[in-house]
Structure formats: C-alpha cells, structure tokens
Image (cartoon, rainbow, N blue to C red):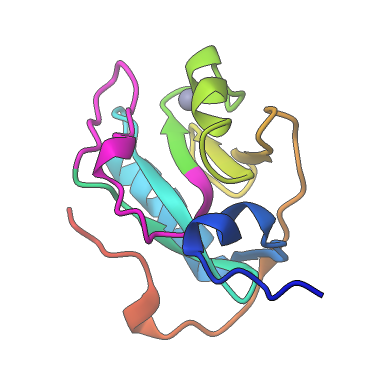
Amino acid sequence: MNPMSTEAVDVGKRRRIKGIARDTLDFILNAARSSHPDEFAGLLEAEDGIIVNVILLPGTISSNRGARIHLDMMPLHLSSVGSVHSHPTPNNRPSQADLAFFSKRGDYHIIVGYPYDDEAWKCYNTQGERQALPVLDVDLDPDTEGDEIW
Ligand code: ZN
C-alpha cells in the first residue's frame, strides 16, 4: 500500500468531487452578472470533495473579447480542481481556447452563460464533455467564501 501523496498539485486531479456548495454557485452567478458584458474567470478550490471557493487570479484580464487566466500567476501550492468563467451570451459551450485551457488544470470546468441564472451554467470535464456537478446545501464559514475584490 502506497502512502497517499499530500502534494497539493497531485491532489487536484485525483480528488473526487461530490458537488459545489450552493453559496459558492451563487457567488459565481453574482460575479458573472456584475461582470457583464465582460467575462470573469477564476479557479475552483474544493474542501472535503466539495467546491467551496473561487480563486480570482491577480493576472486575470477581463474584457468583452474573453477572460484570460494567467496560469503563471497561480501559486503552485494551490490545489484547484478546475475553473469557472462566464460567457456574455447564452452559449455556455466551451470554445477551442477553453478546451485548451481545460486540459491544463483540474477536471471540473464551469461555464456560465447569459443571463447567469440557475439554468445558465454547465460543468465540463477536461475533454469538454458535460459532467454532472450536484449543487449541495452546506454551511460555509463566511470567511471561506470567495473574496469579493470588486
Ligand atoms: Zn469560454
């Protein structure tokens, strides 16, 4: 039996995700709404198999040409399980650029399309295939919710 690796960079890909916290999803939908018509982008962080946090990267450029995540800006110890970004149109399917990014980090990638409601988001895996992401009602410590930097 091999000892489990505790390297955060390994855990991101192997960890099984049970779902996303309702509060975290609400944060994402609100962030998408307030960014409109610009896109917003961030990375998803999980605790105990539940996505509970959105990390907004300092190098993220948001414009109506599309959000770009600067992976160079990401601290290596961060164990993100995937990403989230918004599209200013109802089309929430991944673009070619999205697919190229998905393959680089994590296995859970949320795209929120306009009008950024409960029906407007989808989750994709590394290959850009739809995958289920249950919304879970869990109590979050207010301090662990996504930082609101705007
Ligand atoms: Zn996209």
Whether residue 17 is situated above or below residue 73 in the rendered picture: below
Rendered location of residue 96, percent (x, y): 54, 13
Main SS of residues in magenta: loop
Q: Residue at x 75, y 72 (%)?
A: 2
Rendered location of residue 93, percent (x, y): 61, 24
Rendered location of residue 141, percent (x, y): 42, 86
Q: Quadrant of the N terminus?
A: bottom right
Front residue of 77/97: it is 77
Magenta extent: 59-83
Q: Residue at x 44, y 35 (%)?
A: 86
Q: Residue at x 29, y 45 (%)?
A: 34
5 relative to 65 in the view: left or right: right
In magenta segment, residue 67: yes
Toward which corner of the image does residue 21 lie, by quadrant?
bottom right
In magenta segment, residue 69: yes
Rendered location of residue 131, percent (x, y): 76, 42
Residue 100 appearing in the image: yes
37 relative to 80 in the view: left or right: left
Whether residue 21 is situated above or below residue 131 in the rendered picture: below
Front residue of 147/11: it is 11
Whether residue 33 is situated above or below residue 63 in the rendered picture: below
Residue that lies at the very extreme toward the right in this rendered image: 1
Residue 90 appearing in the image: no
Q: Residue at x 17, y 53 (%)?
A: 150
Give the number of marks: 0
Residue that lies at the very extreme toward the front in this rendered image: 1
142 relative to 58 in the view: left or right: right
Front residue of 49/113: it is 49
